[in-house]
Image (cartoon, rainbow, N blue to C red):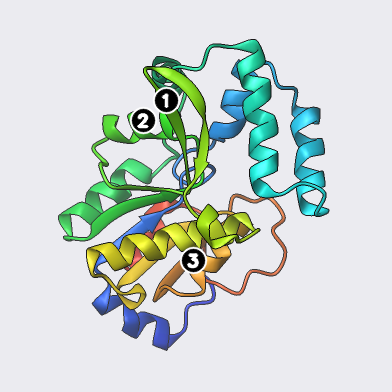
Amino acid sequence: MTITNISSSDNQKKQVIKLVSFDFDGTLVDANSWLLMNDRCGVKREVDAQYYEQYHAGILTYDGWIQLLVDAWKENVVITKELGVELSKQLTLRPGVAETLEYLKNKGYRIVVTTGGVDIIVRPFLESIGITEMVFATECVFKDDTFVGIVNHAQKDEVGEAGLFKLTVFQDFLEREGIVADECAHIGDGANDMEIFSIVAQPFFFDTGITAGDIPYPKISHMTELKEVL
């Protein structure tokens, strides 16, 4: 196993790493929590694809896209936290993830998951494997056990890209915890990880084999490769 694009300066930085952040959808698990919820709630893939295209064309805001999905969910299914737990049981870790997480914990790294995933699905799954620190870009809101909608934690900044949402909440977390980005690594598989990659000392793009274009960061194709550099 060979990790590509790692320079000597990158290797020098690894000694200061204290916190390792992981994306969730597509990184720790093969599935996507949003698609899992959409499928359960009867939202057709082609409909969500249309929303996605409208978002990237600037026709929909990120919050507008989420709201359309939420409205569709509520039309078809009663959204509960129990439903999230049920769907979380359909998830499985990618090969090598459990081994790598155990290795990182034994090495003393602080493990955090930074995600734009659906929290009522992601949270119970992560808790079941012993991960308790999670940074959510968005979260489901309930009032008296009734699903109200989804709050975007970066909304106050009026940023428009999903990657900037994740970066904002990640930076807020680091500030609260008194951690600097130069003490962090982040592993992710998508465009919405690029902004976080740009600030951490050790960025790793998890290459799932799907064409991702030119990625100017070290790539890994199997999670156990992290054991070579962290």
Q: In which quarter of the image is residue 194?
A: bottom right
Q: Which amino acid does label 1 sit on?
A: Phe
| Disc 1 to disc 2, C-alpha distance | 19 Å
Identify the residue at horizontal 79%, vertical 29% (top origin): 47
- Going from N to C along the chain, the mark reached first, 1 or 2, is 2
- Mark 3 or mark 1: which is in front? 1
Percent position (x, y) of residue 11?
36, 81
| Disc 2 to disc 3, C-alpha distance | 23 Å
Percent position (x, y) of residue 45?
75, 28
Marks 2 and 3 close (CB-CB < 8 Å): no
Marks 3 and 1 close (CB-CB < 8 Å): no
Residue under pointer 3: 196
Kind of element beneath mark 1:
strand
Q: In which quarter of the image is residue 190?
A: bottom right
Residue under pointer 1: 142
Residue under pointer 2: 125
Kind of element beneath mark 3:
helix
Q: Nearer the viewer, residue 18 or 145?
A: 145
Percent position (x, y) of residue 219?
53, 65
Q: Quadrant of residue 186?
A: bottom left
Count of marks overlaid on the render: 3
* Numbered circle sitting on residue 18: none
| Disc 3 to disc 1, C-alpha distance | 29 Å
Q: Which amino acid does label 2 sit on?
A: Phe
Percent position (x, y) of residue 1?
46, 61
Say if 123 sits above or below 145 in the image: below
